[in-house]
Amino acid sequence: MKECEGGNFNSTIVRNCYPLSKQLCENLCVAYLSEYDIPAKVLRLTQTFGPGVDYNDGRVFAEFARCAIEKKNIILKTKGETERSYLYTTDAVLAIFAVLLYGENGEAYTAANENTFCTIYNMAQMVANMSGIEVVIKEGNTSQMGYANTLHMDLDTTKLQNLGWKATVTLKEMYKSLIDFMIKNKYNGQ
């Protein structure tokens, strides 16, 4: 998905409040640029993680890391068909600087590691293989559980790469770093 493709989010579905609010904020940035000549650049970070994530974080990548640490099988409540890319925290920081220093006002840039594009199931399987655990699918009624619809977010980072940025950390390296951090900080209130 390129920056000019905003997505097709139905505004009458409550679960879409998050992506729609992000689009509104982007629009407000360019409105202030247009109206008041306030410099504004938009950077869209895909799901970003690495050291610093709280041990009890509720996002799926953190759940997989906890399962690896605790040697518990990963239980998926869906088939894990959502596809997306991920981004390591240092790659995200470098993307922020690239846009701040070299980006154009009024433009949107997407930051993702395109080499990490995979399904939730594939990511779970990678973590399971790294840690000697299993992936178990126990499907339920996802609408009652509040889960998002299955997404296929194949993000295009060409525009950001044209500023000289490139993601460098693989998904496996991201997990190794996250797991190491979580082990070291599990009981330190992090």
Image (cartoon, grey):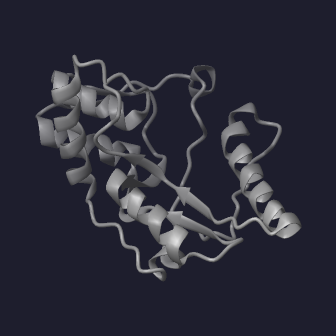
Please provide percent x and percent y for residue 49: 36, 45
User: In terms of image quadrants, where is residue 72?
Assistant: top left
> Could you tell me if residue 68 is visible in this image?
yes
Please provide percent x and percent y for residue 11: 81, 42
Which residue corresponds to the image point at 63% horizontal and 26% vertical from the top-left?
Answer: 143
Q: Quadrant of the C terminus?
A: top left
Name above or below for residue 133 compared with residue 51.
above
Q: Is 122 in front, or is 166? A: 166
Number of labels in the image equals 0
Name above or below for residue 141 compared with residue 11.
above
Please provide percent x and percent y for residue 113: 38, 63
Name above or below for residue 51 compared with residue 78.
below
Which residue corresponds to the image point at 83% horizontal and 37% vertical from the top-left?
Answer: 12
Q: Is 10 in front, or is 173? A: 173
Is 27 positioned to the left or the right of 3 in the image? right
**Furthest-left residue in this view:** 132
Please provide percent x and percent y for residue 163: 48, 80
Is 68 positioned to the left or the right of 157 in the image? left
Q: Quadrant of the N terminus?
A: bottom right
Which residue corresponds to the image point at 30% horizontal and 40% vertical from the top-left?
Answer: 124
Is 63 positioned to the left or the right of 35 in the image? left
User: In terms of image quadrants, where is residue 18?
Assistant: top right
> Could you tell me if residue 156 is visible in this image?
no
**Furthest-right residue in this view:** 35
